[in-house]
Image (cartoon, grey):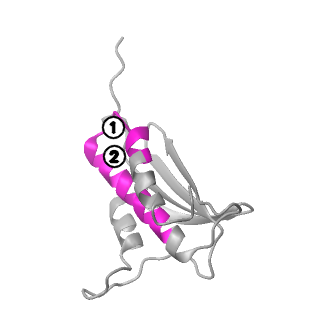
Protein backbone atom coordinates (compact mmCIF):
# COMPACT_ATOMS: atom_id res chain seq x y z
CA UNK A 1 0.00 0.00 0.00
CA UNK A 2 1.13 3.51 -0.66
CA UNK A 3 2.38 5.48 2.34
CA UNK A 4 -0.62 7.79 2.02
CA UNK A 5 -3.74 8.56 4.06
CA UNK A 6 -5.97 7.16 1.27
CA UNK A 7 -4.52 3.72 2.00
CA UNK A 8 -6.55 3.46 5.21
CA UNK A 9 -9.78 3.18 3.19
CA UNK A 10 -8.18 0.66 0.81
CA UNK A 11 -7.09 -1.50 3.75
CA UNK A 12 -10.56 -1.33 5.27
CA UNK A 13 -12.10 -2.65 2.03
CA UNK A 14 -9.36 -5.26 1.57
CA UNK A 15 -9.80 -6.63 5.10
CA UNK A 16 -13.58 -6.77 4.68
CA UNK A 17 -13.08 -8.89 1.53
CA UNK A 18 -10.42 -11.11 3.14
CA UNK A 19 -12.59 -11.88 6.16
CA UNK A 20 -15.86 -12.72 4.39
CA UNK A 21 -17.65 -15.51 6.19
CA UNK A 22 -16.69 -14.37 9.69
CA UNK A 23 -19.09 -12.57 12.01
CA UNK A 24 -19.91 -9.02 10.97
CA UNK A 25 -18.77 -7.74 14.38
CA UNK A 26 -15.37 -9.41 14.03
CA UNK A 27 -14.96 -8.08 10.47
CA UNK A 28 -15.92 -4.56 11.58
CA UNK A 29 -13.40 -4.67 14.45
CA UNK A 30 -10.68 -5.99 12.12
CA UNK A 31 -11.41 -3.27 9.57
CA UNK A 32 -11.25 -0.59 12.28
CA UNK A 33 -7.96 -1.93 13.62
CA UNK A 34 -6.43 -2.13 10.13
CA UNK A 35 -7.56 1.41 9.39
CA UNK A 36 -6.06 2.76 12.61
CA UNK A 37 -2.74 0.91 12.16
CA UNK A 38 -2.31 2.18 8.60
CA UNK A 39 -3.29 5.72 9.56
CA UNK A 40 -0.72 5.66 12.37
CA UNK A 41 1.99 4.30 10.05
CA UNK A 42 1.31 7.03 7.52
CA UNK A 43 1.18 9.78 10.11
CA UNK A 44 4.03 8.79 12.43
CA UNK A 45 6.47 6.54 10.56
CA UNK A 46 8.66 6.58 7.50
CA UNK A 47 7.69 4.43 4.54
CA UNK A 48 9.38 1.25 3.48
CA UNK A 49 11.53 1.44 0.34
CA UNK A 50 9.30 2.33 -2.59
CA UNK A 51 7.15 4.66 -0.48
CA UNK A 52 4.88 1.93 0.86
CA UNK A 53 3.63 0.23 4.01
CA UNK A 54 3.04 -3.51 4.09
CA UNK A 55 -0.26 -4.86 5.42
CA UNK A 56 -0.82 -8.46 6.47
CA UNK A 57 -3.81 -10.46 7.62
CA UNK A 58 -3.54 -14.03 8.90
CA UNK A 59 -6.57 -16.03 9.99
CA UNK A 60 -6.14 -19.10 12.18
CA UNK A 61 -8.77 -21.19 13.94
CA UNK A 62 -8.22 -19.12 17.09
CA UNK A 63 -7.49 -15.55 16.02
CA UNK A 64 -6.92 -13.00 13.29
CA UNK A 65 -3.59 -11.19 13.19
CA UNK A 66 -3.46 -7.87 11.39
CA UNK A 67 -0.05 -6.29 10.94
CA UNK A 68 1.25 -3.12 9.35
CA UNK A 69 4.96 -2.78 8.62
CA UNK A 70 6.61 0.56 7.95
CA UNK A 71 10.09 2.03 8.02
CA UNK A 72 9.86 2.91 11.72
CA UNK A 73 9.92 6.13 13.64
CA UNK A 74 11.85 7.86 16.40
CA UNK A 75 9.47 6.59 19.08
CA UNK A 76 7.78 3.29 19.91
CA UNK A 77 4.05 3.28 19.19
CA UNK A 78 1.93 3.50 22.35
CA UNK A 79 -1.54 4.74 23.25
CA UNK A 80 -1.80 8.30 24.47
CA UNK A 81 -4.38 10.14 26.48
CA UNK A 82 -6.31 12.44 24.19
CA UNK A 83 -8.44 15.16 25.71
CA UNK A 84 -12.03 15.75 24.64
CA UNK A 85 -10.79 18.71 22.57
CA UNK A 86 -8.08 16.78 20.69
CA UNK A 87 -8.99 15.96 17.09
CA UNK A 88 -6.67 12.96 16.97
CA UNK A 89 -4.57 10.73 19.20
CA UNK A 90 -7.02 7.90 19.83
CA UNK A 91 -5.85 5.29 17.28
CA UNK A 92 -3.94 2.92 19.54
CA UNK A 93 -6.48 3.40 22.30
CA UNK A 94 -9.10 2.10 19.86
CA UNK A 95 -6.81 -0.79 18.85
CA UNK A 96 -6.23 -1.61 22.51
CA UNK A 97 -9.98 -1.67 23.17
CA UNK A 98 -10.85 -3.92 20.22
CA UNK A 99 -7.92 -6.35 20.12
CA UNK A 100 -7.13 -9.27 22.43
CA UNK A 101 -3.58 -7.99 22.41
CA UNK A 102 -1.26 -5.93 20.24
CA UNK A 103 2.40 -5.07 20.08
CA UNK A 104 5.40 -3.94 18.08
CA UNK A 105 8.01 -6.11 16.35
CA UNK A 106 11.28 -4.73 15.11
CA UNK A 107 12.90 -6.53 12.21
CA UNK A 108 15.32 -6.13 9.36
CA UNK A 109 12.43 -5.15 7.11
CA UNK A 110 11.13 -2.39 9.40
CA UNK A 111 8.78 -1.96 12.32
CA UNK A 112 5.53 -3.94 12.48
CA UNK A 113 2.59 -3.10 14.68
CA UNK A 114 0.31 -6.12 15.04
CA UNK A 115 -3.00 -6.87 16.69
CA UNK A 116 -4.87 -10.11 17.44
CA UNK A 117 -8.65 -10.40 17.38
CA UNK A 118 -10.74 -13.38 18.21
CA UNK A 119 -11.93 -15.86 18.99
CA UNK A 120 -12.38 -16.92 15.39
CA UNK A 121 -13.30 -20.56 16.05
CA UNK A 122 -16.84 -19.71 17.11
CA UNK A 123 -17.44 -17.68 13.94
CA UNK A 124 -16.02 -20.04 11.30
CA UNK A 125 -18.60 -21.98 9.29
CA UNK A 126 -19.16 -25.55 10.44
CA UNK A 127 -17.85 -28.04 7.86
CA UNK A 128 -20.47 -30.29 6.29
CA UNK A 129 -19.71 -34.00 6.69
> Foreground: 3 or 26?
3
Residue sitting farthest toward the top: 129
Q: Which residues are magenta?
A: 14-40
**x 75%, y 62%: residue:** 108
Secondary structure at numbered mark 1: loop
Q: Which residue is mark 2?
A: 27
Is disc 2 in contact with disc 1, using a CB cutoff of under 8 Å? yes
**Is residue 35 in the magenta section?**
yes
Q: Which residue is mark 1?
A: 22
Q: Could you tell me which quadrant the N terminus lies in?
A: bottom right
Name above or below for residue 24 compared with residue 42: above
Q: Residue at x 52, y 69 (%)?
A: 42
Query: Residue 21 location in percent, x, y?
Result: 34, 33
Q: Position of residue 128 (x, y in %)?
A: 34, 14
Disc 2 secondary structure class: helix
Q: Residue at x 48, y 63 (%)?
A: 38
Amino acid sequence: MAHHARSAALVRRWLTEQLQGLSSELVADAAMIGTELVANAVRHATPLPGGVVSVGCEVTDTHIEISVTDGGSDSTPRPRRASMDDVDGRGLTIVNALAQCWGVRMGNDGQSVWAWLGPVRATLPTPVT
